[in-house]
Amino acid sequence: MLTPELLYWELTETPVRALRDEIREILDAAPIAQARRCRDPRPIHRALGTAGLLAPQWPVEYGGRGVSHVAAAVLVEELAMHDVPDLLHTLTVQIVGTTLLNCATPEMKSRHLPGFAAGETYGCVLFSEPHAGSDLSVLSTRAVRDGDGYRLYGVKTHSIFARLADVALCLARGDDDALTLFLVPLTGDGVAIKPIEALGDDDFHEVTLDGVYVGADAVVGEPGQGWAIVVQTLLYERTGLDYYVKALRWYRAAAGRLNGGGSPQDAAGLARLNTRLVTAGTLVRRVLTRLDRGELGEDEAAAAKWYTTELAADVAWWAAERHGDRALLAEQDGVADPLDTAVREAPGLRISGGTSEMMLETLARLRLDSGVEVRP
Ligand SMILES: Cc1cc2nc3c(=O)[nH]c(=O)nc-3n(C[C@H](O)[C@H](O)[C@H](O)COP(=O)(O)OP(=O)(O)OC[C@H]3O[C@@H](n4cnc5c(N)ncnc54)[C@H](O)[C@@H]3O)c2cc1C
């Protein structure tokens, strides 16, 4: 039977090993079962944040450690291996925080990033609308000028963790029709948040913005630059890292349940997935290296998102087929088994942050534009 020892991030450099050891020490002592039961990982985030380990890739002045994205991957991997619910961290640090780090004014960074890195405040994303998902460019939320600021009107949907977030990145259309990105407080007048039940562990939310007022200092980047910034934001969401570590965690849970036994068909199934995991690890490492160098392209990120989410979904299906309802129903003390989570979460991975079809469409468009010919 294959041993699922695939820890790609077991880097040999002493500082990275030391980073992993520090993170493990905190997570080993953290109330993880409680966090999973309540779907609220904030106490764990605060323990990591106090040590500057919740956003280790950010500069020290904003609460990080100033390490590379490649090194910071050990945090994402350890969160997954300890079964800490991951989406709130992904949204706040990897998506909202990284966007601010790269595009916001120094004032906006100083106001929000230290709170995110400490696990004290949180961010979510308000991009999708009932009639604008894959094609965000048709969105209809309006940003109407009001004195020095703006009033926002519209309905956003499928937002994860809006119930715990303090602020949201929100894409809206200005008086001139150009898209502008705002950082919107979710606690003020004019914001209504309604949960929508989801197949995965975390609810979606519909967020209605009914004339919520934001000052000119809520604009991320410049007015009218929203689309260009969101294209960058989606790159941070599409490195494949989160999906790769989920696939790895689920593979280990499924393989581990065979207890070293299993049929020749099981061995063949594991061998196929194992090989794809090694390939995914190599792809993600390359993408993170390119991100560190500021060279990550839309096509590479689309390839990584597509490959890793399809893999994670296939690991979940394999586990469900092999372990049947033991994978689907197992629960201990109100905490779902990782394979139960896997089976319910897998379909959404192929949709959120851009569907698999859109990733292939992006790849085809960009690679075709760069001269590759497809013959009928
Ligand atoms: C788990 C999860 C979390 C999410 N979290 C958030 C969040 O926090 N914030 C947020 O704003 N949104 C969030 N979303 C929404 C997500 O971004 C959208 O669901 C996604 O972009 C797809 O949009 P849609 O659902 O409107 O589907 P549609 O765009 O209507 O697509 C329907 C189907 O048509 C296909 N399709 C569409 N256009 C094309 C094309 N040109 N070529 C080929 N096929 C095409 C799609 O691939 C898909 O299969 C989340 C979604 C999920 C599942």
Image (cartoon, rainbow, N blue to C red):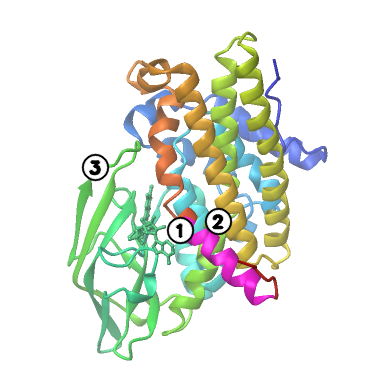
Foreground pick, 55 / 180: 180
Is 262 situated above or below 229?
above
**Of the image marks 3 and 2, the number of the one nearer the N terminus:** 3
- Residue wearing tag 1: 354
Question: Crowdedness of circle 2 by 10 Å Cα count: few (<14), some, many (20+)?
Answer: many
What residue sits 22% from the left and 48% below the top? 195
Q: Separation of disc 3 and disc 1 at Cα?
A: 20 Å
Decide if ligand 1 comes within 8 Å of the CB at mark 1. yes
Going by the numbered disc 3, the residue's amino acid type is Glu
Q: Is residue 325 shown left or right of residue 118?
A: left
Q: Are marks 3 and 2 in contact (CB under 8 Å)?
A: no
Q: Is residue 247 shown left or right of residue 277?
A: left
What is the secondary structure assignment of the residue under circle 1? loop
Is 189 situated above or below 74?
below
What is the secondary structure assignment of the residue under circle 2? loop
Specify the label residue 80 is tagged with: none
- Residue wearing tag 3: 197
Q: Which region shows up in magenta?
A: 357-370
Decide if ligand 1 comes within 8 Å of the CB at mark 2. no
- Residue wearing tag 2: 238
Is 8 situated above or below 375?
above
Q: Separation of disc 1 and disc 2 at Cα?
A: 9 Å
Q: Quarter of the image holding residue 126?
A: bottom left
What residue sits 50% from the left and 24% below the top? 319
What residue sits 64% from the left and 54% below the top? 57
Rendering coords of residue 184 (x, y %): 33, 67
Rendering coords of residue 99 (x, y %): 51, 66
